[in-house]
Image (cartoon, rainbow, N blue to C red):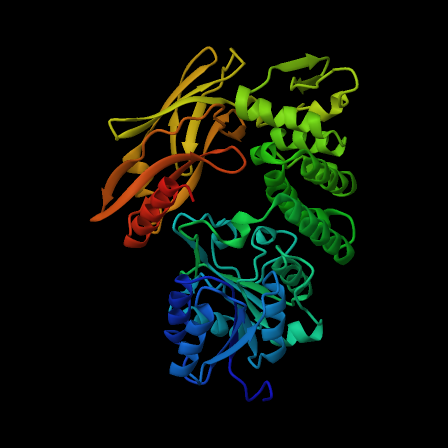
């Protein structure tokens, strides 16, 4: 079938064990308003063992004019099935949809109309999270007809969940690197955006619903750190080969240092065995030494700067000591030496330890805002009471504790801080689908995420908004950051919670 005769868009769905979410995904495709003959779905069952393959076949029987289903043994990741579907695509455009996610009914029609009208090679439609899944919204702040890859928030939205002109894909031979078990969509997306004549954003509609599974079993949540280090090394090497060193490369790599590498040196690294720890630190250190420029470093938090610098020094024990200080003890003191300031983490100025430069926090605006949460409680369910401590006893600037748009000026007594965040405001400003926000402190011009050594979570509270029931809960994320989650109570979530409790009781 020639491109001129083909459908407007081919939707690629790589499927591996995503039931029961797969059903809603497929239903959202059947419900698309783009019109008969304009939609082609190529779904590849990558060896599912949960009945997903049979569910695909059922939809193909019901809608043979829309669905083409391919079955294959499990390949270990989404790259192989995505490439196989691309090889058979006939649409003028290609759209990639996660098998546990779903689309708004008008999504494809709106995206194709935008691409046709503007001549766009890539179009992003607003992505929203479901089940408290966090999706960075910066790039979706407003519509944009012509977005610059190197001068926008686009590097923070490099998932392949976009509309791509197929002629661009074929012209540059774009495919997913099959040797990457995770992050394989990023090289494809980055290269497509690099070559695109025009990239557009539409923020006027909820196009794409990104679902956090109730058991958090999405591949991005469960991947081992060693696998992610390997994939990140391949990804950054790919970017370096595509974009010459300088401001433009740094504009993309800043995202990877702020997100992926920061996560890799998060608190969960304490759980790695000795052999894995050495390999992980060696991999991170090599990336830091080769690609971390002063321009990128200036955009990192003080905590990440220290951890990456110690990793670059190839000292796994010292890095572990730094992480334990933050996670189990608290904010270290600051040592001033002339015009330089240093974070006095374990290993600072010890014989054979990392050099002073690894601990340098001079000029880092967020360092004064680095506080420890000592207690979090719900005051009669009406306010989240947050108590913090700082080794500084001279907090002269107002201290503001916040969770997204909800903020409160704290009462300060020496190094002790107390703030109350309204539960009503936390609920009112959250998405109806649920939302997770980081708890932060702002002192002067600096903002830092709050940590809680020896964290004890308060019991969640239940609130009602517009006749819907929500649970407000305080947790720690995998980097050790204190998070506030607002989650709607649904039948599916209740069932998942009960199943989890049963498994715990049975010792499974």
Specify the farthest residue to the left.
Answer: 467
Please state the horizontal and vertical placement of residue 310, each as a whole percent of the image: 71, 29
Give the quadrant of the C terminus.
top left
Q: On the rendered structure, is 276 left or right of 447?
A: right
Q: On the rendered structure, is 419 left or right of 237?
A: left
Please state the horizontal and vertical placement of residue 486, each as a whole percent of the image: 35, 42
Please state the horizontal and vertical placement of residue 276, each as a whole percent of the image: 68, 39
Would you say residue 28 is visible in this rendering? Answer: yes
Please report the residue visible at 64 percent of the width from the left and 24 percent of the height from the top.
321
Q: Nearer the viewer, residue 105 or 446?
A: 105
Please report the residue visible at 54 percent of the width from the left and 68 percent of the height from the top.
47
Please report the residue visible at 37 percent of the width from the left and 23 percent of the height from the top.
419
Q: Quadrant of residue 61?
A: bottom left
Q: In this rendering, is residue 398 above or below 487? A: above
Would you say residue 251 is visible in this rendering? Answer: no
Q: In this rendering, is residue 370 above or below 210? A: above
Please report the residue visible at 69 percent of the width from the left and 60 percent of the height from the top.
179
Q: Nearer the viewer, residue 362 or 352?
A: 352
Q: In this rendering, is residue 166 above or below 177? A: below
């Amino acid at each position: 079938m020639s491109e001129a005769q083909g459908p407007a868009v081919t939707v690629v769905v790589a499927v591996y064990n995503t039931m029961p979410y797969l059903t809603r995904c497929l239903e959202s495709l059947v419900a698309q308003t783009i019109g008969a003959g304009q939609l082609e779905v190529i779904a590849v069952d990558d060896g599912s063992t949960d009945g997903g393959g049979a569910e695909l076949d059922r939809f193909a029987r019901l809608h043979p004019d829309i669905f083409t289903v391919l079955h294959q043994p499990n390949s270990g990741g989404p790259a192989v099935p995505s490439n196989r579907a691309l090889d058979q695509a006939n649409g003028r455009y290609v759209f990639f949809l996660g098998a546990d996610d779903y689309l708004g009914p008008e999504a494809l029609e709106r995206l194709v109309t935008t691409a046709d009208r503007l001549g766009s090679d890539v179009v992003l439609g607003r992505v929203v999270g479901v089940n408290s899944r966090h999706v960075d919204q910066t790039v979706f702040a407003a519509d944009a007809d012509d977005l610059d890859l190197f001068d926008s928030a686009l590097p923070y939205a490099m998932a392949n969940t976009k509309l791509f002109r197929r002629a661009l894909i074929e012209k540059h031979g774009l495919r997913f690197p099959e040797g990457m078990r995770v992050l394989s969509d990023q090289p494809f997306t980055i290269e497509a955006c690099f070559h695109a004549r025009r990239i557009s954003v539409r923020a006027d509609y909820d196009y794409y619903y990104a679902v956090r599974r109730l058991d958090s079993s999405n591949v991005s949540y469960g991947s081992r750190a060693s696998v992610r280090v390997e994939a990140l090394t391949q990804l950054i090497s790919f970017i370096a080969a595509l974009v010459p060193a300088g401001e433009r490369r740094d504009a993309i790599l800043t995202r990877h240092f702020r997100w992926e590498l920061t996560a890799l040196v998060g608190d969960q690294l304490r759980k790695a065995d000795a052999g894995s720890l050495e390999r992980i630190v060696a991999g991170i250190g090599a990336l830091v030494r080769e690609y971390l420029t002063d321009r990128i470093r200036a955009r990192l938090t003080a905590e990440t700067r220290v951890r990456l610098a110690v990793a670059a020094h190839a000292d796994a024990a010292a890095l572990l000591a730094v992480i334990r200080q933050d996670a189990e003890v608290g904010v270290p003191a600051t040592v001033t030496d002339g015009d330089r300031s240093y974070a006095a983490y374990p290993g600072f100025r010890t014989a054979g330890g990392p050099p002073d430069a690894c601990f340098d926090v001079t000029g880092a605006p967020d360092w004064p805002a680095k506080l420890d949460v000592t207690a979090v409680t719900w005051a009669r369910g009406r306010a989240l009471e947050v108590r913090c401590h700082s080794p500084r006893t001279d907090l002269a600037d107002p201290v503001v504790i916040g969770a997204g748009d909800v903020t409160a000026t704290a009462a300060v007594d020496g190094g002790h801080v107390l703030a109350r965040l309204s539960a009503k405001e936390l609920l009112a400003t959250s998405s109806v689908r649920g939302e997770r926000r980081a708890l932060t402190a702002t002192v002067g011009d600096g903002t830092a995420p709050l940590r809680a050594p020896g964290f004890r979570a308060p019991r969640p509270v239940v609130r009602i908004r517009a006749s819907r029931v929500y649970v407000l809960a305080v947790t720690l994320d995998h980097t050790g950051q204190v998070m506030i989650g607002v989650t709607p109570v649904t039948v599916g979530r209740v069932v998942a919670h009960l199943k989890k409790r049963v498994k715990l009781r049975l010792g499974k």
